[in-house]
Image (spheres, rainbow, N blue to C red):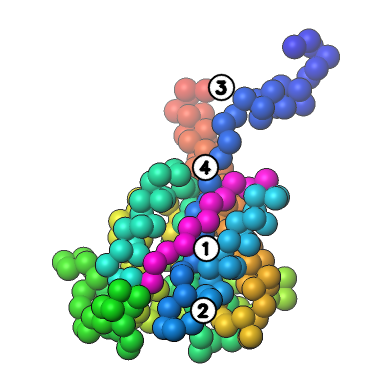
Amino acid sequence: MTRQDGPAAAAAAADASRPAPAPILITGFEPFGGDRTNPSEAAAERAVALLNESGVPAVFLQVPCVFETAGAVVQAEAERVGARIVICAGLAGNRPVISLERIAINLNDARIPDNAGDQPVDEDIIPGQPLAFATRLPVKRALRALRAARIPAELSFTAGSFVCNALFYYTLAKLPASMPVGFVHVPLASEMGVDKQARALAIVARETVAAAEEAADNVGAAVVDLRYAAGIES
């Protein structure tokens, strides 16, 4: 590299040598309750395609609608691909908008059987664990971005007590506390087209990436400030 190349060339060289970022894992459920399709599955898969097309590495996973295995399947895939963010999606057929879930509760209480025929009533998801966990996604930031994109959305304080909530709780309990993890409910395709649902999930993913990068930058700046204050750098 010559002197004339300057900072821009140095920055480009640094970018070229930097490893690709870890992927975002976005999941959707298989059909359940006698339905032939599940919009969360199609929306998650399309969101992953949108992200990859825009240069954001992402991976899709179909999740079984089964209390016993849903969480472990997602945990295993997140670990296998080295995910940096996990966003799980599920269907809320009684809601007309995108619901950004804020709280997962340690309760399985099923109105109908899951796809394995299991119908737990008033059971802990993980015995001995806390009653509830809060999402680790920047849901208020994501809500603003969704509304700016004219996608109807809301914050939700209940993910129910079926497999959606079970997956939400399990991933928060089992995946690293430093990893952004959360759950998004999508409506029926008749209420909101799957393409719009996919755009919504991609927006949530991008906002989560941006929030994580800003937090990392702030930590880095604070470390530099401390080094200067301590006289380590000048």
Label 3, secondary structure: give it: loop
Residue at which label 3 appears: 234
Whether label 3 touches label 2, CB < 8 Å: no
Q: Between label 1 and label 4, give the one nearer the viewer.
A: 4
Query: What secondary structure is marked by label 4?
Result: loop
**Looking at the picture, how far across and down is residue 25, in whole percent?**
50, 54
The residue that label 4 is drawn on is 22
Answer left or right for 60 relative to 170.
Answer: right
What whole-number distance in Å separates the C-alpha atoms at marks 3 and 2? 65 Å
Q: What residue type is labelled 1?
A: Pro
| Amino acid type at mark 2 | Arg
Q: Please name whichever residue, 153 or 202, is drawn nearer the observer in this view of the structure.
A: 202
Q: How far apart are marks 2 and 1 (CA)?
A: 32 Å
Q: Between disc 2 and disc 1, whose residue precedes?
A: 2
The tag earlier along the polypeptide, 3 or 4, is 4
Please report the residue visible at 70 percent of the width from the left and 50 percent of the height from the top: 53
Q: How crowded is mark 4: few (under 14 residues within 10 Å), some or many (20 or more)?
A: some
Mark 2 sits on what residue?
36
**Can you tell which of label 3 and label 1 is closer to the viewer?**
1
Q: Does the magenta stretch include residue 234?
A: no
Q: Give the range drawn in magenta.
A: 55-65
Task: Find the distance from the CA under tag 1 to the CA under tag 4.
Answer: 19 Å
Q: Are marks 3 and 4 in contact (CB under 8 Å)?
A: no
Q: Is mark 2 on a helix, strand or loop?
A: loop
Secondary structure under badge 1? loop
* Residue where numbered disc 1 is placed: 138
Q: Is residue 122 left or right of residue 163?
A: left
Sort mark 3 into few (<14), some (14-19) or many (20+) by Cα contacts within 10 Å: few
Toward the viewer: 180 or 167?
A: 167
Find residue 19 and name its label. Answer: none
The quadrant in which residue 128 appears is bottom left
